[in-house]
Amino acid sequence: MSEQQFNYSQAELADLCGRVLGLARAGGASAAETEVSEGFGQNVSVRKGEVETIEFNRDKGVGVTVFVGQRRGHASSSDFSDDALRRAVDKALAIARYTAEDDCAGLADAELMAAPGFSDLSLHHGWDLSVDQAVELARGCEAAALAVDPRIQNSEGATVSRQESQFVYANSHGFCAGYPTSRHSVSCAVIAEEDGAMQRDYWYTTARAAADLDPADAVGRRAGERTVRRLGARRLDSRQCPVLFEAPVATGLIASFVSAVSGGHLYRKSSFLLDSLGQRIFPVFLQVQERPFLEKGLASAPFDSEGVATHERDVVADGVLQGYFLSAYSARKLGMKSTGNAGGNHNLIVPSTGEDFAGLLHRMGTGLLVTEMLGHGTNMVTGDYSRGAAGFWVENGEIAYPVEEITIAGNLRDMFLGIQAVGSDMETRGSRRVGSILVDRMTLAGT
């Protein structure tokens, strides 16, 4: 199959936005916003060398939000015809007229809109990948995983995915802009068995451009190596000890921080970091930087989902919280201004304290290395944290043996302040870039 293409140009999507806003004005809306988008992709999965699934997707949609005074209504459609657009706008208007007034409802402030002519952040890279080529990549990835060790006898398969999309957002302030994006990936998961006990692990690579993906065979080898090293896992007695969160897991700690200082939790007073602006919540050496303009960044954006311009900023400086993550609505609820985070954070970076992964193990000495988290045991109101975990017991700075069926517990406020180091092994496959994180002490509940 040759490279797929978008069905609409950016100008055509902008024209659709203009038609929707015109219908909203004609229907009596005092303000309105709309987003029109389309996307397509291909997913190919192979298991035990045989093609398991070939999936193609192509979709489009339009969403419209109208404001009648301070009453809000929203509707959407996957049909771009004039009649469908009119019905969607009429539905949104009807909802607004029967909705209670909200003094914080409305578009983001006009002066916060992104200026025209923002920089190209290189977020769209097509991948001219045929099904046959994708099958061969997936087969090579899985074969590399199975070849790691004879104890790997089963596979959950390898998948090669290519996805492209584009959008235009517009509102009645006169803002109208959009751009295309892409996201491609290769992943693999296999199962190893020894003495009747089975272990599973996986690995993946993802990037805006196919050229930036790790080689498929390297992904497979990493998946196989991670699986084999879990064989012979033991349980542990309950104890207190230092915990090293491997980089892919450490991103979850930063995600909990983002959630705690995001508008929804703050104005609902359901965050353990309520009223923490200007307070030290991390050690003095820790920084959290938001960098929305990284080329090819997986969370790069010149404006948020409300058209508000994004800005580089230090969210945490020397351990002190400098700012929240706010949309227009949550900002008004808090008596503040939008931070350009409607839709989430943009490329958060936590700089390393200098140690590589081996250095972190040596610094920890004896403790738990966590490589997988299970379940959802985080209370955002109190900060209490209790999660199932698997990983490795470390003695004298060296990995001693794998462990499983344990629970680690603590309080996020104490865990944040108890961070001792951040590794140089930065995880870059998402919106939060951070290396492995060493926490001074947590409670480990085992057998």
Image: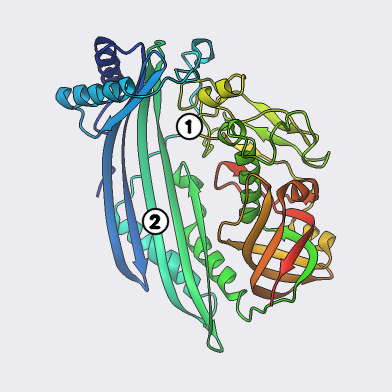
Q: Quadrant of the C terminus?
A: bottom right
Left or right placement of residue 97 versus residue 318 in this view = left
Tell me, yes or no, if residue 312 can be seen here.
yes
Depth order, front residue of 264/46 = 264
Per the rendering, the mark at residue 239 is: none
Left or right placement of residue 96 versus residue 297 in this view = left
Given the image, on which type of amino acid does mark 2 rest? Val
Left or right placement of residue 75 versus residue 294 in this view = left
Query: Residue at the location (51% across, 21% down)?
Result: 119
- Which image quadrant is residue 244 in? bottom right
Query: Residue at the location (25% across, 28% down)?
Result: 8
> x, y (%) of residue 5?
27, 37
Q: Reading the chain from its start, which is encountered first: label 2 or label 1?
A: 1
Query: Residue at the location (82% across, 42% down)?
Result: 283
Given the image, on which type of amino acid does mark 1 rest? Ser
Per the rendering, the mark at residue 122 is: 1
> x, y (%) of residue 325?
60, 31
Residue that carries the numbered disc 2 in the rendered image: 160
Pick out the residue farthest to the bottom.
Answer: 195
Depth order, front residue of 94/290 = 94
